[in-house]
Amino acid sequence: MTKYYFTTRDLAFIGVTASVLVVTGFFTGRLGRLFVMGLPIPGTYGLTNGFFDAFMGVIVAAKIRKFGAITLLGIIENAIKIMTGKPFYAVGPAIAGFLLADFFIWLVRRGNGTDFCLWPVGGILLGSRAIFKIAVFYLLGLPLLKIIRAHPLVSVWVILLSFAIGTLGSFLASQAVLELRRAGVIE
Amino acid sequence: MSSPRGLSGLFRSRESSPVRFLSVETKMFHLASVIILSFVVRSAGCLFLLFLSTFAYSFFARSLRAHFFIVKRMIFFAAVSVALLAVVIREPAYLAGTAVRILARVFIMSSAGILFAATTSPTELIRALDTLRAPKTLIFPITVAVRFIPAIVRETGEIADSLKLKGISVGFFDFLRHPGIYYRAIFMPLVIRSISISDELAAAAEARCFGSPLKRTFLRRNKVSAGDFIFVSAMTLFLIGLIILDGKIRGVF
């Protein structure tokens, strides 16, 4: 048998988690679309379904204690979302956010931090994603920038809100991990 | 909140549709070219033409039902968004110009994606990814994720039904009033079910020698047919024509 870095169990869990995120994204994405199309501000789409990304990201990080687990989750989730119509410019920032969160988890693990120390993961994931998305909009010169240029504080609010929602999601997830571990669902 | 059961219509091959003769690689070409073109093309007329082409493709693919399931919701949200824009930004020129183009792009990208998902079965997708030499670390979770979307939808429905038996309503307004119910009664059981499903799946995959160093074989292979060449040629001509038309409208050519 070829030895893979991720075991079959890890890959299966990442796959199932990605499908949960696609389904929750379908629910919440509509609300996100209302923000994106109604108030064309980059980074707002992630405010609605980002909570679940942060939550499931921490669950995956707690179950699969390997560097790259939640980056792979982000890649799989975005690969499926691009097949169901996610704009391509939003994929890069999303995966970059997962990668940064993975680095944070790696640092926590190196410092012998417990799973409870993972509560800022969601904030890092969503906050950095919002920053990257706004940066991509600047780089591509997309038309929504007119609003950001007129009201620059809007971007700051979007980033702060993303950070807060992500932190809430990962804080709840870190609590849930404790419950799941007590129940014997996670080793 | 409406049921996500319409999602189950995605990632299924329509056996009776003419699109089944197209290879997944050709469908991927269509998806990528439409997404890229929706950004290259800027005039509203050409964006409308591009949307019409995805609509025609959907008609031939016999996936109008799956398409409309999502598009009708998008139309509703687009209408609300435009109304919101009209209140927030009182600029008719912006509404008629930029906002319409943004909405058209979102429609086109989503339509192309939905069409790909509605006309491609997971098995075809795996075969295509294997042909494109994608790493196994990516193929396996993508396969699992695509295959389990209907299962997760079914699980969510069953959890919601069990709550209804207990007299707990799980509508959209209930969510707004008591978001904690969703977390405790729907999301946490879903997480626990996901963990147990993935454990069972991993055991089944390992029993079938997943991870074997030998090259994977398939009963059927994706073959590039004459229909693919005709579709790709027609699509390329259409794309070039659209770029030229867009350039002429904008005065670039």
Image (tube, rainbow, N blue to C red):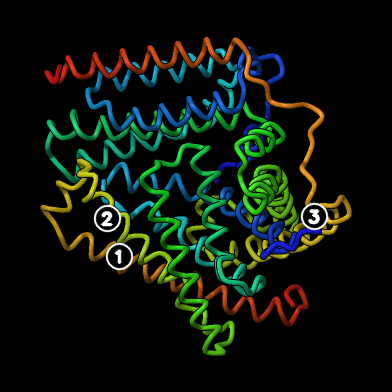
- The residue beneath circle 1 is A159
Element at label 3 = helix
Nearer to the camera, B224 or B207: B224
Tag 1: residue type?
Answer: Ile
Kindly identify which chain the residue marked by label 3 belongs to.
Answer: B
Disc 1 and disc 2 in contact, CB within 8 angstroms: yes
- The residue beneath circle 3 is B201
Tag 2: residue type?
Answer: Ile
- Which residue is depicted at the point 69% across and 34% down? B127
- Residue that extends furthest to the right in the rendered view of this protein: B207
- The residue beneath circle 2 is A134
- Which residue is depicted at the point 68% across and 25% down? B222
Tag 3: residue type?
Answer: Leu
Is B86 positioned to the left or the right of B46 in the image?
Answer: left
Can see residue A9?
no
Kindly identify which chain the residue marked by label 2 belongs to.
Answer: A
Whether residue B47 is situated above or below residue A87 in the rendered picture: above
